[in-house]
Every structure is written in C-alpha cells, then in structure tokens.
Amino acid sequence: MEAARRFRAVGGTHLFLATQNYEPGTPRSVDDYRRQFETTEALARRVHEESGVTVYPVIAPYPIDLVAAGRAIGLGPALEVHRASLDLAGQWVRERRAVALGEVGRAHFPVSEAEAGAIESAFRHAFEVARDVGCPLVVHSADLDAAGFAELNERAREAGLAPEKVVKHYARERRTVTELRGIAPSYVARRELVNAVVSDPAPWFLETDFLDDPRRPGAVLDLETVPRRARAIAERADGSPDRLFVPFVESVERVYGWRPECPEGTVP
Ligand SMILES: [Zn+2]
C-alpha cells in the first residue's frame, strides 16, 4: 500500500499486479493457489480503493514453484497441481478477475533434467490455456537473445496463440523489431534503457519488477520509477512526450485488446 501511494504521488495511474507467494512454503495444491490469487485480488481492490490507482491482476502458478513442490510431493503430482492451477487462472481471466496469465515460463537458474521437463510441460500448457482464453501470457525466463525470442514466437504459433499476445517480462536489453518477432518486451525501467527504447515502435512496456521483500531491499527498482521516467521524458523539448503513448496506451491496446482509461479528475 505504501508503494502504491508513492506511485500515485508521482503521477502513476495504472498498475499491473502479478501474483506471488505470500505464505511461507511453496503452494502444493490448487486450493493453495486459489488462496494466493484471492490475496492478489484483494490487494488489487485495496490499492484501488485507498490510492485510486487502477490495478490489473496477472495470475498463474509461478513456474519455479514446480521445483520445490516436486521435491515435497513428487514431480508428477506437482505438475498436475500446476496444470490445474493454470486452468483456474484461465478461468479467472475469462471471468475478468484477472487480465493475463503470468508469470509463466522457465527457471532462470540450472535445474535437474526431470525438473526442466516438468517446467517445459507446464509452460506448454500455459500457452494452450492462453490460446483457449484468448489472453496475453507474461513470460518469466532468463535473458533472451534474438534466438530466444524466435523460439518463443515459434512456441506461441505451435500452440495457436498469436505471438503478439506474449510479453517477455524483465527484458534488460533493447531488441530490434526484427529480433523481437512479434513478442512484446517489458523493459526494466533503468534510465539508460528507457532512453534507448523510447523511440521504438509498439509494443513495448516499462516495468520495475517491484516486490516488497524486506530481506532484499533495493533488489528491484521502486514502484515510483516508471512514472518518474515518464515525467522526465514528458519534460523534454524534443517531441519525445508523444512517445509515452506507445508503452502506456498503444502497447496495452495491441497486446491486451483494450485501452486503459483514466476516470475524469485522476490525470495528474
Ligand atoms: Zn519474473
């Protein structure tokens, strides 16, 4: 709530809120994930009520949960829970309780062959659910080069999901339109990177990956960073303020299929 207030105070109006594990221990059942999604939904509602910020929940079982859950209950049962929880997340998107499936994807650190196999199988299922629901997929993975984006594009098309519905979250390097192959990068809002991509065509997003973990202070950018960067761009004389339309409106429209609105009186 404090972070959302800081975000609002510097001009932020809309947030995508990805679910995370709020309880000690990894979820081991669909009910564990349902409870987690309900916490995300409640947090989204509270942020909206108390700060006026519009919040879009993004939900899915976190892919890396499969590693710990597999060690606790066996990889087979853990994968079953994971797939069923992806189905639940898809159902929530259908019911408009969330706007996308995420984070889904792969481990960004080495895992065993069996674990990697289960994670791949879950990732494939995430594409299928997104295709059936017709919603975006927010992908967590290691940094991707051009071949990595090509592979994501191929995987989406194999599953029958438009690559334009896939967001690579936590992109740390600028990629050209040719390299991206239709995938939307969500760039970490470091100043140099924002300046490098600000003239690129849609779709691309800015993010902080903010999480409020007292054990890892400063591990990610603060939630205020994106509105602060936007303000810096808007104050330039070189025409770049128009470019803010790309990450904040046009890209949302292209990937999510709707235009974020600002209720009257909320635009700073
Ligand atoms: Zn992530």
Image: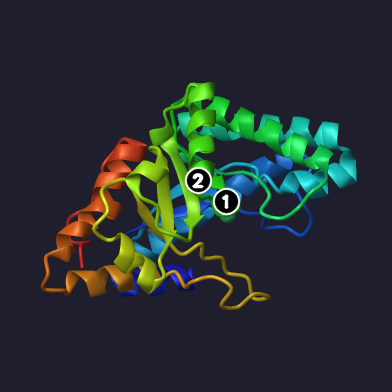
The secondary element bearing badge 1 is classed as loop
Q: Is residue 54 above or below residue 227?
A: above
Looking at the image, residue 58 sits to the left or right of residue 141; the answer is: left
Between the C-alphas of marks 2 and 1, the distance is 6 Å
Name the one closer to the observer, 197 or 5.
Answer: 197
Q: Residue at x 43, y 67 (%)?
A: 4
Q: Is residue 93 above or below residue 104?
A: above
Q: Amino acid at mark 1?
A: Thr
Looking at the image, residue 59 sits to the left or right of residue 267; the answer is: right
Q: Position of residue 82 (x, y in %)?
A: 71, 36
Contact? badges 2 and 1 (CB < 8 Å): yes
Q: Quadrant of residue 148?
A: top right
The secondary element bearing badge 2 is classed as strand
Q: Residue at x 42, y 53 (%)?
A: 186
Looking at the image, residue 48 sits to the left or right of residue 237; the answer is: right
Within 10 Å of the Cα at label 2, are there few (<14), some (14-19), or many (20+) other Cα atoms?
many
Q: Position of residue 72 (x, y in %)?
A: 88, 46
Name the one closer to the observer, 151 or 58.
Answer: 151
Q: Position of residue 79 (x, y in %)?
A: 76, 33
Q: Give the residue number, with chain letter if any, for mark 2.
A: 58
Looking at the image, residue 72 sits to the left or right of residue 241; the answer is: right
Q: Is residue 200 above or below residue 127?
A: below
Query: What is the number of the mark on residue 19?
Result: 1
Q: Is residue 98 visible?
A: no
Point out the image quarter for the C terminus.
bottom left
Which tag, 2 or 1, sits closer to the chain's start?
1
Q: Is mark 2 within 8 Å of ligand 1?
A: no
Q: Residue at x 81, y 45 (%)?
A: 69
